Image (cartoon, rainbow, N blue to C red):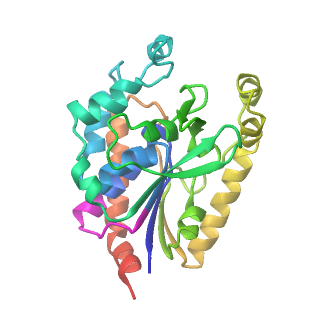
Amino acid sequence: MKTGLVLEGGALRTIFSSGACDAFLDKELPLPDYTVGVSAGIAYGVSYLSRQSRRNLKLVTTYAGDRRYMGWRNMADRKNRSYFGLKFAYETIPNQLLPFDYDTFEAYPGTVEAVVTNLNTGEAEYLPVPRRDAHNLLLQATCAIPMMFPIIEIDGQPYLDGGCADAIPWRRAFDAGCDRVVVILTRERDYHKDADGSIRMIGRHFRKYPNFVETMRTRAERYNASREELFDLEAQGKIKVIAPEDTLGCSRTEKDLEILRALWQSGYFAGSRRAEEIRSFWTKE
């Protein structure tokens, strides 16, 4: 038996997932054997694996309105070229202001992967999250929303947000050998993704990477199909899904602290309600 946790992205909307994971910690559920996440799903998810309950809630409620964390002014910085302040968000905060517990994360015995999209191939890659990286380069890459982040290079390969190629990597969890998979979504169950209206702009901006442009063109169709199959597996009892009933209009770059707190609380309540069900699912023989 191998347990798995899959975390969808969604930038600050992922605070819902953090609430659910914080409830898992409070209820003392065993950590999964395998964790895979996309974008903020895994960037926030590592705090669950380091057992730092409410760390993400404190992070977003402290820094969501801080220009050093996010804001269009950061795009004008030639050393940054991102809506998010990369050095501030991925180095200063975890290493100084709101310390990440690298020791506990390193001690986690399971496997942790982040999804990134390779611009050359247009396909998803699943890379192991380093247990100690003061720059958090892979987490930058998995969070790199097209047009809002610069291209992030790792070992000479250009990457952007993993959600472009595989937004909900539940198949990867099964491929990794998991047979008890829990998926935490950041969109309501009835959500339907529309085609990207900026595909022409994306096509021009990333014309050097035609495979990536094609991936972006088919993104909505693939996302919706993945969710349909996911819910079918849930109905068969092969997977457990936690999803928000209402995301409260929370955007990827939400700055309204009341919305962020309410969405975290919604996730916490959802995780608490399902905790014993998840415990049984993960531990039954």
One can see residue 11 in this view: yes
Residue 120 higher or lower than 188, as above or below: above
In the picture, which quadrant includes the C terminus? bottom left
Q: Position of residue 127 (x, y in %)?
A: 51, 51
Which residue is found at the position 48% from the left and 22% from the top?
83
Percent x, y of residue 155: 54, 38
Q: Residue at horizontal 58%, vertical 35%? A: 156
In the image, 188: left or right of 133? right
Q: Is residue 65 above or below residue 133?
A: above
The residue located at (35%, 62%) in the rendering is 271
Q: Is residue 64 visible?
A: no
Q: Nearer the viewer, residue 192 or 36?
A: 36
| Magenta span | 23-34
Q: Residue 73 occupies which quadrant of the picture? A: top left
**In x, y percent, where is residue 178?**
50, 72
Does residue 37 appear to the left or right of 57 in the view shown? right
Tell me if 59 is positioned left or right of 259 in this view: left
Horizontally, is 17 left or right of 179 in the view?
A: left
